[in-house]
Amino acid sequence: MCRVTTPGGATDVDVLVVGAGITGIYQLYRAREAGFSVQLLEAGGGVGGTWFWNRYPGARFDSESYTYGYLFSKELFDEWEWQEHFAEQPETERYLNHVVDRFDLRRHIRFGAKVTSAVYDEASGCWTVVVDDGTELRARYFVAATGVLSVPFFPDVPGRENFRGESHHTGLWPPEPVDFTGKRVAVIGTGSSGVQIIPVIAREVESLTVYQRTANWCTPLNNRPITPEEQRQLRADFVAIRETLNTSVSGFLHPVHDRATSDDSKEERAAFFEKMWNSPGFSKLTSNYTDLLLDHDANAEWCEFIAGKIRSIVKDPDTAAKLIPDHRFAEKRPPFVAGYYETYNNPNVSLVDLKQTPIVRLTEHGIETAEGVREFDIVVWATGFDFGTGALSRMGIRGRHGLALTDYWADGPKTFLGVQTAGFPNFFFPGGPHAAAGNNPRYNGDQVDFITDTLVYACEHGYDTIEVDPAAEEEWTNMIDKRASLGPFGESSYFFGTNIPGKPKRYLLNSGGRPKLFSVIAEVVETDYQAFKLSRTSGPTG
Ligand code: NAP
């Protein structure tokens, strides 16, 4: 059993985790099971992280529920019956609460505790973490599992503060239900959140106006309830499912296709695209033609297929034309929808194309564009997040010599495996920048496992200070930057940080993917953690 904190010693806790989302909860579980004393600080009033804050109507998974949940316990997998292939937010929040209680983790969590600063003390090798109520905690290891989509972004639209109706951001949704009945509602933004909320609230509102700057390639989620037979099969297949999820490149169960577009005739391609259109969630990316994301013509043919679907669903040709994107499929993260395009056939729903008529300002009662003012009771901001580094850059993190993380990362994040950065010993950030490139919990879980194994290794070898070698960090970061242009995402995607004014343009996902993560982790373990400087800062353990 590992324990580095001595009673009455310099630290309050061995491992301090921040964030009770799916990654933080798993980190808490793993560190405690390894024998460390652990505390978790959570700014919100409950567990769930992104599934706590994003409680807008229609919020749901677009990864299959049983591929998103935890795999560390067969009993947990057996006893939790997901109701739908793609669970809605309330079910996910219930699931995460169940996990926390099932494994007796709640007593380690402090809610309503927002970290305002975290400073490394070189003399003791510990972190001093301050919470917004003034509480100070000293920890040997500081693990920020603060998520990539946890800082909502409000565009700097003139007059935003002047609007006197209700305003809500999808990523900061209030706990009490918002009453849309008979209201005049505006939704700004048509990313994954916007296109999820639009069809759901359209049923309740008096009128709904969608402000779209960039149309997205939306395809059907194809959600449905999990049948009793499927429930039985999932349980019977647990070992195989876990094996596939733990080894698949994407972290999904979808099988990879074995054909390129040129292998099939035009008719066969049309039939295959129809099959893809009717397939669940991300299989449109993971199981589509092998050249779809790489070859311009293959991508264009799939886009034309989707454009045809949009034209056939949306009755007004002018609206349909506005809904057809002019970028490649997957240049921006594609959303998955239920009844989204159909919504525009409702007489109370209209679409404003901001490329033709940009927002001029918000007034006290509505939104003014070049074509005039429309008045609203509620404005929904579905305008995204400060992705990847948003939370880490707002926590007042300082490493060796008082160096601020925001200064060290002024030109974008530098990491090793997306878990550590040089000059910030004993600080880890699973599920942050350079972490995932597929089904997030699978990638982030790999990182948590690696971090926990590293803490155990250090403890067993008498070390308590772990700091990545700058050379290893440089190699990993160069790899991320070099491979960024090889993936499908374009520089207009928030994966490059370009949605936030002034943010450096750097790739924020793991462009090496899971295979690279696995191979480098294997190398680290084989070489007895040579990529890290391991040392002992405190006195002998008690
Ligand atoms: P997003 O994809 O970044 O979309 C933000 C939207 O707001 C875009 O349409 C953007 O337009 C628009 N926007 C930003 N600034 C604007 C401005 N000044 N004026 C007008 N429009 C503006 O954010 P999101 O929809 O919240 O989704 C973020 C990510 O969360 C998703 O990609 C996904 O990874 C995750 N998510 C997942 C699910 C799920 O199904 N599991 C659901 C929701 C979210 P531009 O494109 O022109 O910038």
Image (cartoon, grey):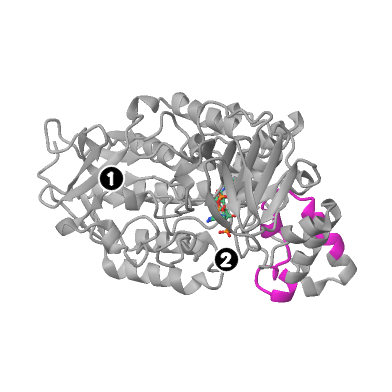
Secondary structure beneath label 1: strand
Q: Quadrant of the C terminus?
A: top left
Q: Which mark is residue 203?
A: none
Task: Name above or below for residue 147 compared with residue 20.
Answer: below
Q: Position of residue 118 (x, y in %)?
A: 24, 46
In this rendered view, identify the residue nearer to me: 301 or 528. 301
Residue 489, magenta (yes or no): no
Secondary structure beneath label 2: loop
Badge 2: residue crowd in 10 Å (few <14, some 14–19, many ≥20): many
Residue 274, magenta (yes or no): yes
- The amino acid type found where label 2 is placed reads Phe
- The residue wearing badge 1 is 142
Q: Residue at x 45, y 63 (%)?
A: 519
Badge 1: residue crowd in 10 Å (few <14, some 14–19, many ≥20): many
Q: Over which residues does the magenta segment extend?
A: 270-299
Q: Position of residue 309 (x, y in %)?
A: 82, 57
Tag 1 and tag 2, C-beta contact below 8 Å? no
| In-image side of 197 versus 341 (left or right) | left
**Foreground tag (1 vs 2):** 2
Q: Which mark is residue 489?
A: 2
In this rendered view, identify the residue nearer to me: 253 or 308. 308
